[in-house]
Image: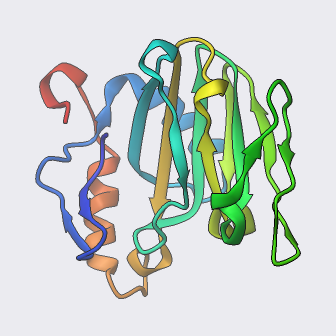
Amino acid sequence: DFGPKVNFKKRKIQLGPFHGFPDFTKSLVDRLTQILVDFKPVELCHLEYVPSRGSAIDPHVDDTWLWGERLVTVNLLSDTVLTLSPVLYAENHIRLEGHNQYNSSHDNNKVNIALRVPLTRRSLFVLAGPLRHSWTHQILRDDVTSRRLAMTFRELSLEFTPGGQFEKHGQEMLFIAKRFVSFASHSN
């Protein structure tokens, strides 16, 4: 990852190891900031998924104390499927073998829902609004069929922007995030 080191439980941020984004991401970051209004990324999570390792991401909602409204992911090398589930029901999915849908599981007369969003190779996906805050997202092991790279960029929450409680920390992170450094000399 490239960005501040964060202890979300204690709400502590350490900027020391963050020197900027890898230089190979400059043209992509420039493009994202052109097409997404007021998008100022301060973190890049760069993940590799490999089927032989059983790669997957468990259902989760990204932190909202530090990370802002939009999670911006570029999907590279292969297609996959992002599965979204309402937070209340995320734990109770039963996958129907051979189908791209879920069986409805009844718990106190509640029906579970899952949205399956195809992410094609070289696609851009922006998770925002109710899907960002009230739905979990995950990549199922079965949906990693060949090597995949995902680059997720995160922006700051309002608490770290001008007028917010942690504005000073936000300014520091934004200043560092405007730098693009050699990957070999500053990888974390």
Residue 128: tell me if it is visible: no
**Residue 31 lies in quadrant:** top right
Where does residue 107 sit, x and y in percent of width and height? 79, 71
Residue at 79% of width from left, 51% of height from top?
114
Q: Height in image: 32 above or below 5?
A: above
Between 71 and 84, the one lying in front of the other is 84
Looking at the image, residue 21 sits to the left or right of residue 74; the answer is: left
Between 155 and 53, the one lying in front of the other is 53
**Residue 53 lies in quadrant:** top left
Q: Height in image: 39 above or below 109?
A: above
Residue at 83% of width from left, 24% of height from top?
98
Looking at the image, residue 93 sits to the left or right of residue 166; the answer is: right
Looking at the image, residue 109 sits to the left or right of residue 44; the answer is: right
Where does residue 146 sit, x and y in percent of width and height? 58, 11
The quadrant in which the N terminus is found is top left
The quadrant in which the C terminus is found is top left
Residue 174: tell me if it is visible: yes
Where does residue 157 sit, x and y in percent of width and height? 48, 71
How many numbered badges does the structure rendering display? Answer: 0
Q: Height in image: 113 above or below 45?
A: below
Chosen colour scheme: rainbow
Between 107 and 22, the one lying in front of the other is 107
Where does residue 37 sit, x and y in percent of width and height? 66, 56
